[in-house]
Amino acid sequence: MTYLLDSNTFIQAKNDFYRFSFCPGYWDWIIDGYHRGQIFSTEHVRQELLHLQDDLAKWITSFAPKGMFIKTSDASVNSYAAVVNWVSNRETYKQAHKNRFLSGADPWLIAEALSGNHTIVTFEKSQPESAMVKIPDVAHGFGVPTLRIYDVLEQTGRRLTLS
């Protein structure tokens, strides 16, 4: 199984529970997962993270393997069009939320997962009745599985231990 990491699996980790200063094992796990052919993300997520211009952006440029961020393929462009159409036609979402969602990396992440048969890893939770667009709900509309990072840590058999 291959996993695509959402931006928030990097950002929340860096800001909260897997900070670089005391949990380097998380970041090593991401790199190791890439080398094992399990952990990836998209070039759109990479660009989103680089715009932060912080320690995470430095980690991306200095340590993250370049191949970990999948470049847009013809298949994912076709899937992207389907994702845009799906989101645009949902009446439960407010237009401002649709615009915000469609202008970021999220629809590209879903498109890549759909075209490449990947599982999306995100901290977002499904809220199908919400006016906000959430990755799990859009992914579900296309049959793309989503997991939280804790589930992926378990599934990959890795453990983060304190020393």
Image (spheres, grey):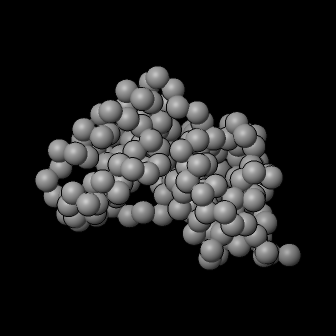
Q: Residue at x 42, y 63 (%)?
A: 124
Q: Is residue 139 left or right of residue 65?
A: left
Q: Quadrant of residue 41?
A: top right
Residue farthest toward the right in the current orientation of the protein: 163
82 in relation to 137, above or below: above
Residue farthest toward the left in the current orientation of the protein: 91
Q: Position of residue 104 (x, y in %)?
A: 43, 51
For the question of whether residue 117 can be seen, the reply is no
Q: Residue at x 47, y 49 (%)?
A: 105
89 in relation to 14, above or below: above
48 in relation to 119, above or below: below
Q: Position of residue 10 (x, y in %)?
A: 61, 61
Q: Nearer the viewer, residue 93 or 155?
A: 93
Q: Residue at x 38, y 64 (%)?
A: 125
Q: Position of residue 37 (x, y in %)?
A: 68, 37
Q: Quadrant of residue 34?
A: top right
Quadrant where the N terminus sits is top right
Q: Quadrant of residue 154?
A: bottom right
For the question of whether residue 21 can be seen, the reply is yes
Q: Residue at x 72, y 40 (%)?
A: 66
Q: Position of residue 132 (x, y in %)?
A: 28, 63
Count of marks, rendered view: 0
Quadrant where the C terminus sits is bottom right
Q: Is residue 98 left or right of residue 117?
A: left
